[in-house]
Amino acid sequence: MNAKVELRQEQFLPEENHDKNTDPRRHNRGFAKGFASGVIVAAVVAAAALFGLSRSSLVRLYISPSSSSEALLDDETEEKIETISAYILSDYYEDVDTEELRDGLFDGLFENLDSYSRYYTAEEYEELLENTLEGTYCGIGAGLQQNTDTMLVTIVHVYDDSPAQEAGLQEGDVIIEVDGVDATSMEVEELAELVRGEEGTSVHLVTYRGEDTIEYDIVRRSMDYPTVESEMLEDSVGYIAVSEFTQATTDQFVSALEDLESQGMESLIVDLRWNPGGVLSSVCDILDEILPEGLILYTEDANGTRVEYTTTDTVSLDVPLVVLVNGSSASASEIFAGAVQDRDAGTIVGTTTYGKGVVQTVHTLADGSAFKLTTQTYYTPGGTCIQGIGITPDVEIEYEFLGGEDDSYSYDLDNQIQKALEILQAE
């Protein structure tokens, strides 16, 4: 085949469904109320995150299949597709949407590749860009978490001033139906897509709360969601928690850092536990506020082509630093922790991270649809590939809640934060 296809190219670091354990910080009725937990899909967040380029910096190029590789769509394959499709269109017992059939064909091309590679319709890709680039979404404002054993999806966070809060949804509610569709066995990403929708439209939810079944009609609304929360702890220790790296996170982080510095911050804890990743430009810009000039990470493709990402010497943080991580810290979170660790800029505390060390390139076709393909491996400044391995903390400590059954979450009952404070106090 010689047909050329117009493409726009971007790179992604997808978020993943990591450790489904609940983020204990969500139980705090004060500061931590802004957090989602585990794999937050939040009716809300797409399961992929932009790696570097924004919409305004898309690269246009033209490609045609390599003549040296075996053609996927040879004459025999094309004839087979035409034969099967003819039978479907003529004999299937219901009306067939040919556009959906075509999308199914494109989906199928990625079935035997890795879990990160996939096809997006134009609508799916537009939603992906809005969620991951802008830190906004149109939905109800609820964080979702799935139990991998039962497949049940529970609301683990209700955002302030959201449609979910206004309707009366509560943390712990189990979603069993969305717009008449049984939700007790579907993947959380699929459920989240049903909950999201156009602004001003309504979604009907049926939930369990204890032994009660409660129904809601909730009008979707476009919302920004906070990804950074901060507070001054004891002994002038600043605390900044980042739940995700979106395009909006950099400004939120810088604002939090400046506020803590104005309060006399003498050391800093950056909490990346349960952070599934996000926009590379965001984590690089934040690291530029913390680290002096030097390497953040580099990538290599199948041909050995190397691309480096670096910090500048414009500004850096001159106080002791601890970074908290766990098994749900992934992707951009691991870039942050790996750069800090390899450059001896702070102490990494917690448990081994998820281990997401590959990069996806997203090509957008002329009709607005797109496909995401794993194309590169990334390495920490010291040359470590963390794919399938993760980052081992300098100080390994499993999470333990130090309170009793009736105690709400607080910093002084979080053993990992207490260990971070102990380390900073000793410096």
Image: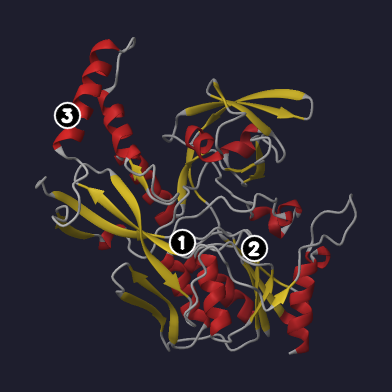
Q: Secondary structure at mark 3?
A: helix
Report which residue position mark 1 lands on: 248
Residue 146, numbered circle = none
Whether residues under marks 2 and 1 lie with C-beta atoms below 8 angstroms apart, the answer is no
- Residue type at mark 3 is Glu
The C terminus, quarter of image: bottom right
User: Percent position (x, y) of residue 384?
Assistant: 50, 76
Give the residue drawn at x 75%, y 82%. 423
Whether residue 297 sits left or right of residue 170 in the image: it is left
Q: Secondary structure at mark 1?
A: loop
Q: Secondary structure at mark 2?
A: loop
> Can residue 265 be seen from the camera position used here?
no
User: Percent position (x, y) of residue 213?
Assistant: 71, 23
Whether residue 33 sits left or right of residue 205 in the image: it is right
- Image: 27 above or below 335: above
Report which residue position mark 3 lands on: 79
Q: Quadrant of residue 273?
A: bottom right
Give the Cα distance between marks 1 and 3. 49 Å
Q: Residues within 10 Å of mark 2 (few under 14, many from 20)?
A: many
Whether residues under marks 3 and 2 lie with C-beta atoms below 8 angstroms apart, the answer is no
Report which residue position mark 2 lands on: 273
Q: Quadrant of residue 103?
A: top left
Q: Disc 2 or 1, which lies upstream in sequence?
A: 1
Q: Disc 1 or 3, which lies upstream in sequence?
A: 3
Give the residue drawn at x 36%, y 41%. 124
Q: Nearer the viewer, mark 3 or mark 2?
A: 3
- Residue type at mark 1 is Ala
Q: Residues within 10 Å of mark 3 (few under 14, many from 20)?
A: few
Q: Disc 3 or 2, which lies upstream in sequence?
A: 3
The N terminus, quarter of image: top left
Residue most toward the left?
Answer: 2
> Can residue 379 be seen from the camera position used here?
yes
